[in-house]
Amino acid sequence: MTTQETLDQIASEVAVCTNCALHKGRIMSVPGEGPANAEIMLIGEGPGATEDAQGRPFIGAAGKFLVELLGQAGLKRTDVWICNVVKCRPPLNRDPLPEELAACNLYLERQIAAINPKIIITLGRFSMGKFMPGAKITQVHGQMRKIEGRFVIAMFHPAAALHQAALKPAILADFARLPQLLEVARKAPETVAGREPANQAAQAAIPTFEQAKPAQAPVGESEKTEEPKQMKLF
């Protein structure tokens, strides 16, 4: 089975999935989209109303800004794979529940394995938490880390800049560095997810999650400790 056939098979399973309660309110599932050979995979949080209606990820206001951000890196939307940690819209855009994340993670892991991207970019708290549990986006955004054999970069969700304009410069700067980071990932030794490369010296320049030094938080941005009712994007 080719990579595209595998992705199509996953999408057909997602379309009829009843593994969690989110299927009860969906109009359309949103499995993800992009080229099967994408070097970059972007993982957001969950579909919104527009995505639920059309079955495509990031096609609302945040999606338009994402296209701008990709352009900052010399990329087009059609160059990357885009998906979310949950494949159906949570009611009223609330935070996805643990059982919903777990149900959709089975599909997401298969997509990651099929595409085998050079870099995974997480957009938002829940996608970041999948790879960096307990991390704070204000401290780690824009930093590439080797996690279980894969390069991962946590970035602010594009919607964050729509809600808090002070974050826009940081988001633009992070995406502007993407071409440089992609070159590093391309030159790195090939690894199997979950295993370190045999040549440890070749990997020394890339910090792991534990080794990386925290980046300075954007001016005016503070950490939130309480859980909001609406999906927390940053």
Image: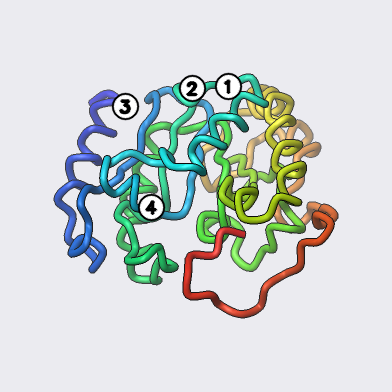
Report which quarter residue 46 is drawn in: bottom left
Q: State which tag comes first along the sequence, 1 or 4.
A: 4
Q: Is residue 151 left or right of residue 38?
A: right
Q: How is the image coloured?
A: rainbow
Q: Secondary structure at mark 4?
A: loop
Amino acid found under the numbered disc labelled 1:
Leu
Name the residue tied to disc 2. 79
Q: Residues within 10 Å of mark 4 (few under 14, many from 20)?
A: many
Between the residue at mark 1 and the residue at mark 4, the CA separation in whole angstroms equals: 24 Å
Amino acid found under the numbered disc labelled 4:
Gly
Residue 111 position within the rendered picture, expressed as x and y whole percent measured from the top left: 36, 40
- Residue extending furthest toward the left: 16
Closer mark to the observer between disc 1 and disc 4: 4
Closer mark to the observer between disc 3 and disc 1: 1
Report which quarter residue 138 is drawn in: bottom right
Name the residue tied to disc 4. 48
Closer mark to the observer between disc 4 and disc 3: 4
Closer mark to the observer between disc 3 and disc 2: 2
In-front residue for pair 46/200 = 46
Residue 200 position within the rendered picture, expressed as x and y whole percent measured from the top left: 73, 38
Amino acid found under the numbered disc labelled 3:
Thr
Disc number placed over residue 3 in the picture, else none: 3
Name the residue tied to disc 1. 75
Closer mark to the observer between disc 4 and disc 2: 4
Residue at horizontal 82 percent and vertical 52 percent from the top: 215
Q: Residues within 10 Å of mark 3 (few under 14, many from 20)?
A: some
Q: Secondary structure at mark 3?
A: helix
Task: Answer whether labels 2 and 1 touch (C-beta < 8 Å).
Answer: yes
- Residue extending furthest toward the bottom: 226
